[in-house]
Image (cartoon, grey):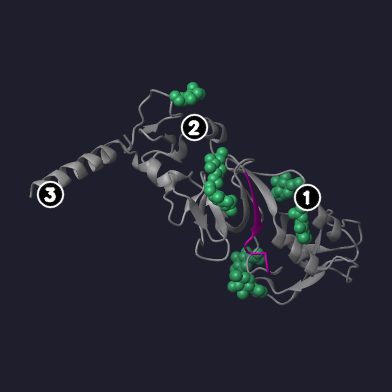
């Protein structure tokens, strides 16, 4: 009996200080995060098993049990192919275009400018849909699309501006721009360009740079912390082993929220 009491006493001494001092957010956010095929994902991304306070709003990954993570930017779904947290870049492919060139709905590639910018060296390709032409133009990369339940209409892609030579008379209902890598752009500019090349280029994706308190986060990590977003407000939080700080583990300001 005495032994049992002693054991309980020892156990409670071992457990209670730990549970009082441990920062829950720090413990939760230090767990490695895997989404679909991508491992070791950290701030600003969250989703799947990783709660929002470990990431930044607008960086939620979905489809973590599927083939690739899906990130939604301005209501368009992107397949996340690569995440590089040292350069704050992701390589993504348009989810609606990655395996077909005639999507049901046409959306442009529009970013949320506070969160993402296009990386340099990814020229745009322009896809024209629903075109009318007095004569069948001699363009590489022509294809036919049944867009929006209408009859098949002429569509094509080009990395140059629409050939606006007076007299071609081509007019199109819709255009969308999508960045492709430079090698792909080179192939797509050749007279031999085909929709197979187009599909490969779209599936290979393009690169975006993210901004999510990048500098602040770097300082937090250097001080031994983990980056996140406050549970109760959309402000930055630096989760440290002792408690949650505003900016770095060394700062003395206290942080509102649940972590103490
Ligand atoms: C990048 O991810 C690794 C884990 O894969 C993590 O240890 C590191 O702190 C992250 N760096 C930044 C700047 O987020
Ligand atoms: C993930 O991180 C672990 C340990 O931090 C490392 O051993 C492993 O190679 C990393 N995996 C990838 C795919 O980067
Ligand atoms: C494209 O991929 C989606 C999702 O993986 C799939 O449902 C669809 O059938 C594919 N379409 C074609 C034309 O392969
Ligand atoms: C591609 O198009 C987008 C939007 O249409 C534009 O913001 C971006 O600057 C263009 N990229 C290049 C390399 O011209
Ligand atoms: C598709 O059809 C809907 C309904 O007729 C119309 O509102 C929409 O503008 C069309 N979209 C395109 C891209 O043509
Ligand atoms: C560029 O895209 C092509 C597909 O068109 C792909 O095979 C190639 O690996 C990509 N290159 C780079 C550097 O991403
Ligand atoms: C923060 O504190 C740690 C440990 O006390 C120290 O090693 C580090 O240099 C400090 N960093 C800054 C930016 O003051």
The C terminus: image quadrant? top left
Q: Is residue 23 visible?
A: yes
- Residue 215 bears which disc, if any? none
| Helix, strand or loop status at disc 3 | helix
Q: CB of residue at label 3: within 8 Å of ligand 2?
A: no
Q: Give the x, y percent position of residue 80.
A: 61, 56
Query: Do the residues under discs 3 and 1 have CB atoms within 8 angstroms?
Result: no
Q: Quadrant of residue 133?
A: bottom right
Residue in the foreground of this view, choosing between 188 and 149: 188
Magenta residues span: 89-99
Task: Name the residue carrying label 2.
Answer: 220
Q: CB of residue at label 2: within 8 Å of ligand 1?
A: no
Instruction: Please name which of the two marks, 3 or 1, marks the residue nearer to the observer.
Output: 3
Q: CB of residue at label 1: within 8 Å of ligand 4?
A: yes
Residue in the foreground of this view, choosing between 176 and 149: 176
| Helix, strand or loop status at disc 2 | helix
Instruction: Please name which of the two marks, 2 or 1, marks the residue nearer to the observer.
Output: 2
Residue in the foreground of this view, choosing between 179 and 145: 179
Task: Name the residue carrying label 1.
Answer: 123
- The residue at 52%/30% (across/down) is 219
In this picture, is 156 found above or below 255?
A: below
| Helix, strand or loop status at disc 1 | loop
Q: Give the x, y percent position of residue 16.
A: 23, 40
Q: Residues within 10 Å of mark 3 (few under 14, many from 20)?
A: few
**Residue 105 in the figure: left or right of residue 173:** left
Disc 2 from disc 1: Cα separation? 35 Å
- The mark nearer the N terminus, 2 or 1, is 1
Disc 3 from disc 1: Cα separation? 72 Å
Instruction: Please name which of the two marks, 3 or 2, marks the residue nearer to the observer.
Output: 3
């Amino acid at each position: 009996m005495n032994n049992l009491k002693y054991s309980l006493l020892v156990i409670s001494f071992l457990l209670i200080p730990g549970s009082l001092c441990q920062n829950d957010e720090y413990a939760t956010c230090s767990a490695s995060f895997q989404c679909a095929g991508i491992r070791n994902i950290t701030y600003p991304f969250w989703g799947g098993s990783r709660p929002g306070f470990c990431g930044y709003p607008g960086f939620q990954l979905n489809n973590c049990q599927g083939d690739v993570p899906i990130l939604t930017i301005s209501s368009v779904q992107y397949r996340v192919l690569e995440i590089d947290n040292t350069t704050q870049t992701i390589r993504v492919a348009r989810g609606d275009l990655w395996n077909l060139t005639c999507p049901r709905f046409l959306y442009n590639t529009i970013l949320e400018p506070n969160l993402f910018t296009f990386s340099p060296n990814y020229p745009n390709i322009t896809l024209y849909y629903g075109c009318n032409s007095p004569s069948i133009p001699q363009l590489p990369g022509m294809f036919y699309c049944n867009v929006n339940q209408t009859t098949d209409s002429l569509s094509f892609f080009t990395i140059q501006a629409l050939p606006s030579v007076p007299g071609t008379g081509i007019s199109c209902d819709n255009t969308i721009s999508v960045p492709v890598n430079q090698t792909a752009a080179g192939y797509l500019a050749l007279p031999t360009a085909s929709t197979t090349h187009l599909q490969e280029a779209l599936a290979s994706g393009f690169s975006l740079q993210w901004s999510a308190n990048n500098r602040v986060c770097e300082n937090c990590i250097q001080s031994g912390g983990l980056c996140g977003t406050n549970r109760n407000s959309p402000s930055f939080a630096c989760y440290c082993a002792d408690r949650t700080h505003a900016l770095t583990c060394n700062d003395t300001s206290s942080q509102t929220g649940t972590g103490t």
